[in-house]
Image: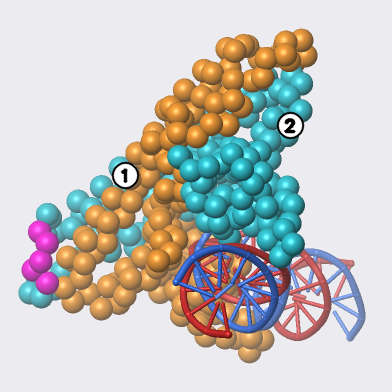
Chain colours: A cyan, B orange, C blue, D red
Amino acid sequence: MNNAINVAMNIGKLAAATNTPVETIRYYERSGLMPPPARSTGNYRVYTPADAERLAFIRQCRALDMSLDEIRTLLGFADAPDGACAAVNTLLDEHIGHVVQRIDELRRLERQLRTLRKLCHENGAQATAIGDAAAPCGILAGLAQPGDEVGGKAAGPASAHLGGTHARRKARS
Amino acid sequence: MNNAINVAMNIGKLAAATNTPVETIRYYERSGLMPPPARSTGNYRVYTPADAERLAFIRQCRALDMSLDEIRTLLGFADAPDGACAAVNTLLDEHIGHVVQRIDELRRLERQLRTLRKLCHENGAQATAIGDAAAPCGILAGLAQPGDEVGGKAAGPASAHLGGTHARRKARS
DNA sequence: TGCAAACCCTGTAGTGACTCCAGAGTCAAG
DNA sequence: CTTGACTCTGGAGTCACTACAGGGTTTGCA
């Protein structure tokens, strides 16, 4: 945050300045998010302040859980900002939609898990390892049958298996 | 749900009965969650009702967003349920903790995104594509600088980049 | 009986966004 | 001149699947 992003630097410095692992920077270059930088005589990558800004932008977007594809789009707008505002708003609104949906899913999940948790016959206890192993654990029993209070309707087997804000998997045809 | 899980069947039937893609069942076998089943004369996999129950258990856990590792552990408890209750509770509590934490992260995220969204100088508008392209989009500007209202403190660059309930990445030493 | 459709097999490669490693080259300080 | 920190490339591993190629098997129907 306070280091010199105002002169040319090589990858380690850029990494430190933007709090990004070196490998990740190289990965961004491979996948076209960062342009291939100039090289020193020893073939080291040499970055400019503009590169640092671009990387900071990318990291910022990643911290907001945007996919690299979304960021690519956004960078396209930033590079050629003619009438970008509406498109940026749209992208952002969609992304917010993803996040909200994921939160809903996780809340349903939490409710189901807490329901399940209550099924334990030795509720709230912790140790008591050996002793009452006669009755099978209610939780395991609850997990064994599909479509009761747990999972059946809300999450549904193989319906929308979550992931990380973004839906991937293209619904095999 | 209503089909015959009460006799031997091959993989397609098991898939239909548990609403699981065939490839996924084979994948579970490869990764040790499902035991290698018996084979027919034509080398087809032959599953028993017990296999169907086990798979239903796995799918149930997956619908609750548990990792295959967690499920493996749980299956271990189910196979040898001596003093499992405490351990099951612990695992479940930890898992609930993951979910709750992820919800918190996403809520922070949502707040940040909505803040960002407000930065657009043509707030709330939609079209208006070409015309006032003179001023650069406030959103893009907001994303360009690190550590303001957006991202800086809450999500923090490269701090805990989310994913899918579970933290993977082992904090390189 | 012949044949096509539907099923199943193995093995491999791809997804996203990194992460880690090996083996080699480069640079700055002492 | 050596040591250690830094950098390079290329490849493999992560998670939980998904998709496909190129074959074999089974079933149903004419």
Q: Who is closer to the viewer here, A78 or A171?
A: A78
Contact (Cβ within 8 Å) of mark 1 with mark 2: no
**Can residue A66 be seen in this snapshot?**
no
Residue A115, image x, y percentages: 25, 47
Secondary structure of the residue carrying numbered label 2: helix
Chain designation of label 2: A
Identify residue type, mark 1: Val
Identify residue type, mark 2: Asp
Q: Main secondary structure of the magenta part?
A: loop
Residue A128: in magenta span: yes
- Relative to D5, does residue A57 appear above or below in the rendering? above
For residue A96, side relative to residue A151 (left or right): right
Give the residue displayed 33% in from the left and 51% down from the top.
Answer: B98
Q: Which residues are magenta?
A: A125-129
Q: Disc 1 marks which residue?
A: B100
Residue A37, image x, y percentages: 72, 51
